[in-house]
Amino acid sequence: MVSTKIGRLNHIAIAVPDLSEAVKVYRGLLGCIVSEPMALAEHGVTIVFVELDNTKIELLHPLGSDSPIEKFLQKRPGGGVHHICYEVEDVEAAGRQLVQEGARVLGDGPPRIGAHGKPVLFLEPRDFCGTLIELEGA
Ligand code: CO
Protein backbone atom coordinates (compact mmCIF):
# COMPACT_ATOMS: atom_id res chain seq x y z
CA MET A 1 0.00 0.00 0.00
CA VAL A 2 1.28 3.45 -0.90
CA SER A 3 0.42 6.00 1.77
CA THR A 4 -0.71 9.56 1.26
CA LYS A 5 0.92 11.57 4.02
CA ILE A 6 -1.41 14.10 5.62
CA GLY A 7 -0.06 17.10 7.47
CA ARG A 8 -1.60 19.49 9.96
CA LEU A 9 -5.22 19.65 11.01
CA ASN A 10 -6.40 22.74 9.14
CA HIS A 11 -9.90 23.00 10.60
CA ILE A 12 -12.89 21.20 12.02
CA ALA A 13 -16.22 22.21 10.47
CA ILE A 14 -19.41 22.23 12.51
CA ALA A 15 -22.82 22.57 10.87
CA VAL A 16 -25.12 24.89 12.81
CA PRO A 17 -28.83 25.63 12.44
CA ASP A 18 -28.47 29.22 13.69
CA LEU A 19 -25.28 31.04 12.80
CA SER A 20 -25.71 34.02 15.11
CA GLU A 21 -26.45 31.72 18.06
CA ALA A 22 -23.33 29.72 17.22
CA VAL A 23 -21.27 32.91 17.04
CA LYS A 24 -22.58 33.88 20.48
CA VAL A 25 -21.47 30.53 21.86
CA TYR A 26 -17.96 30.74 20.43
CA ARG A 27 -17.42 34.48 20.92
CA GLY A 28 -19.35 34.90 24.14
CA LEU A 29 -19.20 31.66 26.10
CA LEU A 30 -15.91 30.35 24.77
CA GLY A 31 -14.05 33.65 24.34
CA CYS A 32 -12.85 33.09 20.77
CA ILE A 33 -12.01 35.45 17.96
CA VAL A 34 -14.75 34.86 15.38
CA SER A 35 -14.76 36.28 11.84
CA GLU A 36 -17.64 37.97 10.07
CA PRO A 37 -19.86 35.60 8.02
CA MET A 38 -18.61 34.77 4.53
CA ALA A 39 -20.97 33.46 1.83
CA LEU A 40 -19.56 30.73 -0.42
CA ALA A 41 -22.28 30.23 -3.01
CA GLU A 42 -20.34 27.57 -4.91
CA HIS A 43 -20.21 25.40 -1.79
CA GLY A 44 -23.73 26.21 -0.62
CA VAL A 45 -22.58 27.52 2.76
CA THR A 46 -22.16 30.62 4.84
CA ILE A 47 -19.09 30.26 7.05
CA VAL A 48 -17.59 31.96 10.04
CA PHE A 49 -14.08 31.14 11.17
CA VAL A 50 -13.17 30.67 14.80
CA GLU A 51 -9.48 31.20 15.49
CA LEU A 52 -7.82 28.86 17.96
CA ASP A 53 -4.12 28.78 18.84
CA ASN A 54 -3.47 25.54 16.99
CA THR A 55 -6.25 25.29 14.42
CA LYS A 56 -9.54 26.78 13.27
CA ILE A 57 -13.18 25.88 13.71
CA GLU A 58 -15.54 26.66 10.84
CA LEU A 59 -19.19 27.15 11.64
CA LEU A 60 -21.24 26.21 8.56
CA HIS A 61 -24.76 27.31 7.80
CA PRO A 62 -26.75 26.35 4.69
CA LEU A 63 -26.83 28.83 1.80
CA GLY A 64 -29.26 28.28 -1.06
CA SER A 65 -31.83 25.58 -1.66
CA ASP A 66 -29.62 22.56 -2.42
CA SER A 67 -26.97 23.09 0.22
CA PRO A 68 -25.33 19.87 1.43
CA ILE A 69 -25.50 21.35 4.93
CA GLU A 70 -29.30 21.52 4.73
CA LYS A 71 -29.51 17.73 4.33
CA PHE A 72 -27.04 17.24 7.15
CA LEU A 73 -29.11 19.44 9.49
CA GLN A 74 -32.31 17.62 8.58
CA LYS A 75 -30.76 14.53 10.15
CA ARG A 76 -29.19 16.48 13.02
CA PRO A 77 -31.39 19.50 13.75
CA GLY A 78 -29.20 20.70 16.60
CA GLY A 79 -26.05 20.75 14.44
CA GLY A 80 -22.92 18.64 14.66
CA VAL A 81 -19.42 18.01 13.40
CA HIS A 82 -19.60 17.97 9.60
CA HIS A 83 -16.03 17.39 8.43
CA ILE A 84 -12.39 17.69 9.37
CA CYS A 85 -9.76 19.15 7.10
CA TYR A 86 -6.19 17.91 6.80
CA GLU A 87 -3.45 19.67 4.89
CA VAL A 88 -1.55 17.93 2.11
CA GLU A 89 1.22 19.31 -0.07
CA ASP A 90 -0.36 18.43 -3.41
CA VAL A 91 -4.10 17.85 -3.27
CA GLU A 92 -4.39 16.58 -6.84
CA ALA A 93 -1.63 14.03 -6.36
CA ALA A 94 -3.14 12.99 -3.02
CA GLY A 95 -6.54 12.42 -4.65
CA ARG A 96 -5.01 10.34 -7.46
CA GLN A 97 -3.00 8.28 -5.00
CA LEU A 98 -5.97 7.57 -2.74
CA VAL A 99 -8.10 6.52 -5.70
CA GLN A 100 -5.33 4.20 -6.84
CA GLU A 101 -5.44 2.61 -3.39
CA GLY A 102 -9.17 2.03 -3.73
CA ALA A 103 -10.52 4.94 -1.68
CA ARG A 104 -13.24 7.17 -3.07
CA VAL A 105 -13.05 10.89 -3.69
CA LEU A 106 -16.40 12.70 -3.74
CA GLY A 107 -17.45 14.40 -6.95
CA ASP A 108 -15.91 13.81 -10.32
CA GLY A 109 -13.89 16.79 -11.26
CA PRO A 110 -10.59 18.26 -10.19
CA PRO A 111 -10.17 19.90 -6.78
CA ARG A 112 -12.35 22.95 -6.16
CA ILE A 113 -11.25 26.17 -4.55
CA GLY A 114 -12.20 26.05 -0.87
CA ALA A 115 -12.94 28.62 1.77
CA HIS A 116 -9.31 29.67 2.09
CA GLY A 117 -8.66 30.13 -1.63
CA LYS A 118 -6.81 26.82 -1.84
CA PRO A 119 -7.71 23.65 -3.78
CA VAL A 120 -9.72 21.11 -1.79
CA LEU A 121 -11.10 17.59 -2.23
CA PHE A 122 -13.61 15.71 -0.11
CA LEU A 123 -13.24 11.99 0.61
CA GLU A 124 -15.98 9.38 0.95
CA PRO A 125 -16.76 8.99 4.68
CA ARG A 126 -17.34 5.23 4.38
CA ASP A 127 -13.70 4.82 3.37
CA PHE A 128 -12.38 6.97 6.24
CA CYS A 129 -13.76 5.71 9.53
CA GLY A 130 -17.16 7.32 9.04
CA THR A 131 -15.78 10.86 8.86
CA LEU A 132 -16.08 13.29 5.97
CA ILE A 133 -12.52 14.43 5.27
CA GLU A 134 -11.52 17.51 3.35
CA LEU A 135 -7.99 17.64 1.98
CA GLU A 136 -6.58 21.11 1.45
CA GLY A 137 -3.56 21.66 -0.78
CA ALA A 138 -0.78 24.13 -0.21
CO1 CO B 1 -13.80 22.77 5.39
Image (cartoon, rainbow, N blue to C red):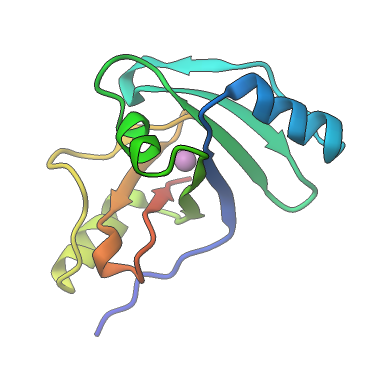
> Residue 28, located in which quarter of the rendered image?
top right
Please give left or right for residue 102 compared with residue 94 in the image.
left
Q: Position of residue 20 (x, y in %)?
A: 66, 19
Please, is residue 36 above or below residue 83 in the view?
above
Looking at this view, is 129 or 17 the one in front?
Answer: 17
Q: Position of residue 42 (x, y in %)?
A: 32, 20
Please give left or right for residue 17 compared with residue 29 in the image.
left
Please, is residue 103 above or below residue 3 in the view?
above
Looking at this view, is 117 or 33 the one in front?
Answer: 33
The N terminus: image quadrant: bottom left
Please give left or right for residue 89 compared with residue 102 in the image.
right
Please, is residue 124 above or below residue 110 in the view?
below
Residue at the image position 58 percent from the left and 37 percent from the top: 58
Q: Position of residue 133 (x, y in %)?
A: 39, 55
Residue at the image position 70 percent from the left and 35 percent from the top: 50
Residue at the image position 14 percent from the left and 71 percent from the top: 102
Residue at the image position 24 percent from the left and 22 percent from the top: 66
